[in-house]
Amino acid sequence: MSKIKKIVLGVFTAIMITISVGFQSDFFEIAKQIDIYTTLFKELNMYYVDEINPAKLTNNAVNHMLENLDPYTRYYDEHGVEDARIESAGEFGGIGVVTKFNNNTLTVREILKNSPAEVAQIKPGDKILKINEILVKDFDEKGVSALLNGLPNTQVTLQIERQNKNLELTLTRKKMDVNPVPYFTMLDTEVGYISFTIFNEKATEEVKKAFLELKDQGMKKLIIDVRSNPGGLLMEAVKISNFFIPKDKIVVTTKAKVEKWSETFKTREEPLDLEIPVAILVNNRSASASEILAGSLQDYDRAVIIGERSFGKGLVQKHLPLSYGTQMKITISKYYTPSGRCIQELDYTNRDDKGNIPKFSDSGREKLKTEKGRTVYGGGGILPDIEINKVSTTKTTETLLNSDAFFNYVTNYFYKNASITSPSKFNLNNEEYNALKNYLSNHQNDFETKTETEFKKAKELAISEKLDGNLTANYSLLLKEIQTEKLKELDKNKEEILNELTEEIVKRYYYTEGVYQQKAAFDKTIMKAVSVLNNTKEYNSILKN
């Protein structure tokens, strides 16, 4: 045997031994940890002073383990798998409400258009006390949801509290289909606008329908609004991208640890239009499939992206069957745009000791090139070609927008005003902002910041340790000062708060369709997109840089 062959054989043997040792080491470690858990579980079951619930204990252990990975990897017990099967099979029925369960109270937050809830005249703000003969307060959030939903054409009777009055309503469930395109229109004689809220199984069909109808109305330029669109079905993103780029072009690539799950998705059809100027609107809640659509069209220099940097959700999940009818949804790969940009922003694998999650962009964003040679940046999310700068949302504003106080203010507004003007004419001003602040000053407990919560806990602790003394008077003064500063802090996000307030009020009267109708008339990002599309020189200069 020649010397070269001996060297090659030696290197190959060394590599195989290393792989084998590594594999055996990994296998041993997994077997060791499983054995530790099994032994511990048996000892607990045999010797713990009280009876334990094995299923509950396992669920808690598994869910806690998965929490340390990412928010998308989840375990489903037998009941959870069955719920998912019914929904995916199209046998799911509902009444068409979005609810919030808090402090054993189930509150209706939103009514879907053309739903049983709309027919029965259920209103946002209604509190559901009983579902059939079952008291809501006796259940948790998951259990309550299961009681509301069921097979289409079955009935459910609700006892509702509305404005301190009790009502009983019987509704017939129906299959709920969410229209991914709640509104589209011509903004001027040439610019068409499509609002696009989710990539569900109807997305391609509805976007195409809107596009063709707008073309019939004379559309020569197009805005697609995927702001706050959380994504959905991958293939819908590929098909919609295909409307504007040629056949056999790469739209997205997934890269996985397991080679067979690494895939490249290409366009398969002839496009609808290769020439029409396109602007895509994104914000920090545009995620997943929205980022695939925006990123692919940006990489092919086919659209101008306008708005804020997108969310950066580039993780792909797959459902895997487990023993005894259980199931796991597991993150298996990451999304990459045609230029090679990784969409994922949060690096869940490398949390620090305090649980903080770093961002891939923290270490510097990778420079890549579009088809025409423009520079784009990887490392998380889609960076727009034109950024619409806005004041950062403060923690206090976040607390307000998610609070009962904000929701209740809108509910009160709804009952005080039997109607409002059409969405295309409705726009709030400083007077309404000041009215909101006055309401908040009188409903502080429904809008509580973390500072207030911790401050109240400190007082309770002081009382329990007999350290309160003369604390009460000083505590009240300090709490009042905190609440005064809290209201002042809101002024930093006055415009954002007014926009959110406008949206919530319009939704009460005109549903999601009305929200986008109002945006089409007043939204600054849409106005900027119209300006760019109508300025051919500016549009072309962006795509040729």
Image: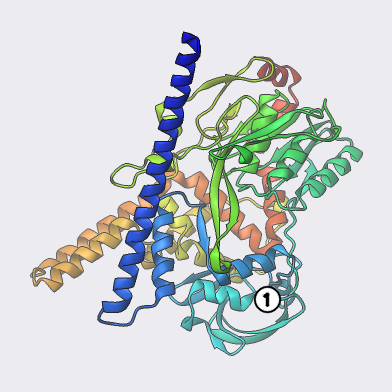
* Observer-nearest of 51 and 189: 51
Residue 312 in the image: x percent, y percent? 53, 39
Vertical side of 20 occupied by 230: above or below: below
| Residue found at x 52% / y 37% | 344
Residue at the spot 40% in from the left edge and 37% down from the top edge:
22
Inspect the image, locate mark 1, and give the three-letter code of the amino acid beneath it.
Gly
Asked which quadrant contains residue 335, the reply is top right
Name which residue lies at 66% across and 19% down: 542
> In the rendered picture of this protein, how many numbered marks are placed on residues?
1
Q: Could you tell me which quadrant the C terminus lies in? A: top right
- In depth, the one of 296 and 28 nearer the eye is 28
Residue 522 in sight from this viewpoint: yes
Q: Quadrant of residue 97?
A: bottom right
Q: Report helix, strand or loop for mark 1.
A: loop
Asked whether residue 314 is in view, the answer is no
Label 1 Cα crowd, 10 Å radius (few <14 / some 14-19 / many 20+): many
Query: Does residue 541 appear left or right of residue 404 in this picture?
Result: right
451 relative to 188, above or below = below
The vertical placement of 213 against 411, above or below, is above
Residue 459 vs residue 317: left or right?
left
Please state the horizontal and vertical placement of residue 284, each as a whole percent of the image.
54, 41
The front one of 212 and 269 is 269
Q: Find residue 489 and report its horizontal and vertical position in percent.
A: 37, 48
Residue under numbered circle 1: 150
Q: Is residue 74 left or right of residue 481?
A: right
Residue at the front extreme of this rendering: 1
